[in-house]
């Protein structure tokens, strides 16, 4: 089957960086030249410039046993020291590290000195509990400062954390605890979500109970619990410990030991659409180098003046790299928020931007589109003039959502960085550099300095400008995954076998190169539809639909069709203001015609269903396989990873 993906949409709008922004930007065009001249020397320079090395490295990249890379392997450092102690020792202990906002409106300001103190105490507690280098600690917590402290305390003592998103079920938690062989679990009684306490400790109890028949060996010795929700919890004496009983009483004296740059740092499980979750393993020196570098140059971080807010939960890779590690390594001040965007009111995020004077906002396209659905009147009630840079992460952002974000949230001036990367890549790989790049709505644009990507056909051959195919990374990069926990063969098979002869990493995403050679993401290759012999990207048809002024969000799938092989089926959320004035039938018919006019008859949806919500994971990704089940009249598959498991019942009823 051809890997060429037909290109459907043209986007001609361009936005040069504002002159004032460019004059003060961290990144300059010279970075590309430096990286082009000597890629390894470039990354070595970044590692030395951005991090403190207890033992300086002399080797940069060891690629003698691909696909298993080693970066800066003979160097030694401590990740927590780089994120905390050195800022305090450098005279910045009074700088705010975390501006924490609880869902109920309670707040805390945590300085670098205070966070360092807490992490040192917790490191001593963990050591007393028998946790040492290489041991695994599971973290299952709400977005509270203690969650960041937990991650940093674990890595401070050379142990490995496995953070599990606080919305996952006991079964999901059990698998991750067992697969990693966790020795300790750090959790909370509960956390606030949508105005209610979401119980966490009870889920831990359930995950650790009744292992008969699971074949898993009980590895957890202690459960450390933060009191946050105030909900009732059962207590297992000898195993369970209250954080407030041990951490404040522990010594605040703890010297950070140096560990090798290839020391494992964390395991993070990708839920995956098929098969068991994969435990993606990241190590220390290369990961922190690229995390700090990309946070600095893509988010244009000026630590002394910026208030940065990445809205991701620490349960996802975005929360690891751009909440915990990148910003703290750079000494930044950042907002962390416990709750959901619409609680207790739909303007909650904009209220937070106004309250703290947020300057850099990094969020997901799905959040932007949900705000579009509500309408511009909500953000217009708040002062968003502090925002100087906007970022997008998680999936391709369609041009109209990009334009809405720029106009309504960014006041028509804030540059937008649309970033492509994955759990596996560890840090941003493709993005505009604000202050340097002329941006194009909907395009991830160019690989960052020091990163090498290509778009190729099934044989691994470059497709050329103006064509679409498969996105690959052609050279090793510092923050790359070092394997799948406990399964090196699956690691090779999943990411490297397809282009084994070229040595390319295949991400599973389709992309095209425009006439300038810039990258446009076309979604997962699994989501490409084959309609009458044409390979169509769901992303481009969704972009066309959202380009209609009535549409807030859309998801497109291919459903079996006797005539065309596959047919386009669209599920569409309409903006509230339009729902009052038009019938669902009229809107659906109008949108079929709209896509035909915008793209051509080949892409016109066979069916358009008007729905109230789309099935999304807690990280905001749309689960198209469930919509495919509905479109083809099958029983809907596993919904356990959805943010709202009831949504599929509603969609199924609407379709019927």
Image: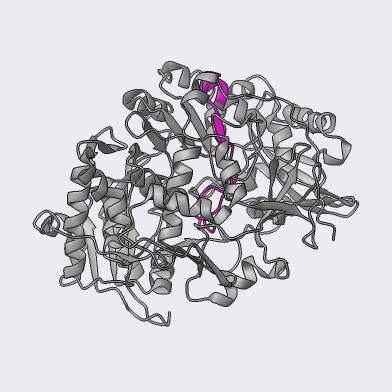
Left/right placement of residue 9 relative to residue 614 reads right
Percent across and percent down for residue 25 are 48, 29
Residue 381, how many percent across, how many down?
43, 16
Residue found at x 55% / y 31%: 416
67 falls in the magenta region? no
Foreground pick, 355 / 43: 43
Identified at 40% across, 59% down, the residue is 164
Left or right for 72, reference 243: right
Residue 426 within the segment the image draws in magenta? yes
For the C terminus, the quadrant is top right
Left or right: residue 561 compared with residue 648: right
Q: Is residue 280 above or below residue 51?
A: below
Q: Quadrant of residue 216?
A: bottom left
Percent of width and height locating residue 518:
70, 40
> For the image shown, how many numbered marks are present on the structure?
0
- Give the left or right position of residue 432, taking residue 12 as reference: left
Part of the protein shown in magenta: 406-433
Q: Is residue 446 visible?
A: yes
> Is 150 rendered above or below residue 446?
below
Q: How is the image coloured?
A: one colour
For the N terminus, which image quadrant? bottom right
Magenta part mainly helix, strand or loop?
A: loop
Tell which of 525 and 646 is nearer to you.
525
Q: Nearer the viewer, residue 256 or 152?
A: 256
565 in relation to 235, above or below: above
Vertical order, 411 against 234 (above or below)? above
User: Percent from the top left, x then y, of residue 317?
Assistant: 46, 53
The residue nearer to you, when weighing 446 against 56, is 56
Q: Is residue 376 visible?
A: no
């Amino acid at each position: 089957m051809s890997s060429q993906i037909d290109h459907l949409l043209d986007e001609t709008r361009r936005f040069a960086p504002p002159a004032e922004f460019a004059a003060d930007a961290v990144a300059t065009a010279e970075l590309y030249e430096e990286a082009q001249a000597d890629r390894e020397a470039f990354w070595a320079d970044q590692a030395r410039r951005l991090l403190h090395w207890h033992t300086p490295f002399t080797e940069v990249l060891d690629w003698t046993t691909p696909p298993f890379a080693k970066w800066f392997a003979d160097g030694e450092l401590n990740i927590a020291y780089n994120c905390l102690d050195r800022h305090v020792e450098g005279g910045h202990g009074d700088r705010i590290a975390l501006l924490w906002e609880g869902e109920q409106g309670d707040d805390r300001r945590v300085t670098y000195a205070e966070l360092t103190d807490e992490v040192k105490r917790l490191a001593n507690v963990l050591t007393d509990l028998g946790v040492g280098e290489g041991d695994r600690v599971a973290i299952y917590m709400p977005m509270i400062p203690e969650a960041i402290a937990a991650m940093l305390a674990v890595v401070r003592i050379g142990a490995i954390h496995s953070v599990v998103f606080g919305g996952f079920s006991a079964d999901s938690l059990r698998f991750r605890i067992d697969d990693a062989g966790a020795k300790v679990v750090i959790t909370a009684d509960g956390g606030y979500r949508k105005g209610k306490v979401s119980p966490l400790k009870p889920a831990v109890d359930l995950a650790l109970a009744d292992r008969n028949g699971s074949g898993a060996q009980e590895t957890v010795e202690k459960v450390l619990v933060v009191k946050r929700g105030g909900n009732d919890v059962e207590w297992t004496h000898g195993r369970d410990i209250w954080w407030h009983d041990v951490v404040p009483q522990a010594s605040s004296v703890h010297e950070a030991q140096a560990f090798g740059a290839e020391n494992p740092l964390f395991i993070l499980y990708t839920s995956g659409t098929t098969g068991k979750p994969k435990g993606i393993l990241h190590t220390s020196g290369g990961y922190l180098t690229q995390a700090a570098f990309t946070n600095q140059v893509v988010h244009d971080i000026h630590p002394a003046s910026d208030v940065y807010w990445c809205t991701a939960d620490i349960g996802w890779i975005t929360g690891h790299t751009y909440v915990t590690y990148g910003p703290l390594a750079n000494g930044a001040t950042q907002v962390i928020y416990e709750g959901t965007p619409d609680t207790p009111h739909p303007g909650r995020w904009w209220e937070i931007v106004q309250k703290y004077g947020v300057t850099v906002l990094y969020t997901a396209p799905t959040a932007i589109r949900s705000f579009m659905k509500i309408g511009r009147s909500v953000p217009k009630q708040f002062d968003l003039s502090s925002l100087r840079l906007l970022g997008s992460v998680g999936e391709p952002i369609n041009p109209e959502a990009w334009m809405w974000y720029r106009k309504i949230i960014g006041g028509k001036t804030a540059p937008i960085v649309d970033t492509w990367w994955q759990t596996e890549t560890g840090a941003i790989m493709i993005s505009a550099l604000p202050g340097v790049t002329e941006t194009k709505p909907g395009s991830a644009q160019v690989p960052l300095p020091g990163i090498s990507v290509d778009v190729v056909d099934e044989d691994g051959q470059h497709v050329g400008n103006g064509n679409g195919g498969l996105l690959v990374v052609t050279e090793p990069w510092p923050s790359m995954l070092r394997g799948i926990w406990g399964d090196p063969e699956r690691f090779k098979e999943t990411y490297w076998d397809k282009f084994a002869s070229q040595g390319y990493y295949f991400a599973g995403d389709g992309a095209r190169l425009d006439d300038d050679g810039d990258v446009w993401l076309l979604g997962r290759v699994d989501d490409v539809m084959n309609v009458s012999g044409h390979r169509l990207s769901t992303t481009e048809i969704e972009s066309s639909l959202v380009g209609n002024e009535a549409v807030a969000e859309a998801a497109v799938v291919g459903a079996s069709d006797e005539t065309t092989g596959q047919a386009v089926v669209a599920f569409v959320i309409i903006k509230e203001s339009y729902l009052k004035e038009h019938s669902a039938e009229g809107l659906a018919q109008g949108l079929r015609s709209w896509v035909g006019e915008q793209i051509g008859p080949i892409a016109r949806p066979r069916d358009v269903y008007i729905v109230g919500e789309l099935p999304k994971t807690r990280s905001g990704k749309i689960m198209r396989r469930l919509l495919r089940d509905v479109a083809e009249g099958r029983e809907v598959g596993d919904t356990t990873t959805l943010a709202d498991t009831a949504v599929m019942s509603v969609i199924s009823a609407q379709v019927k």
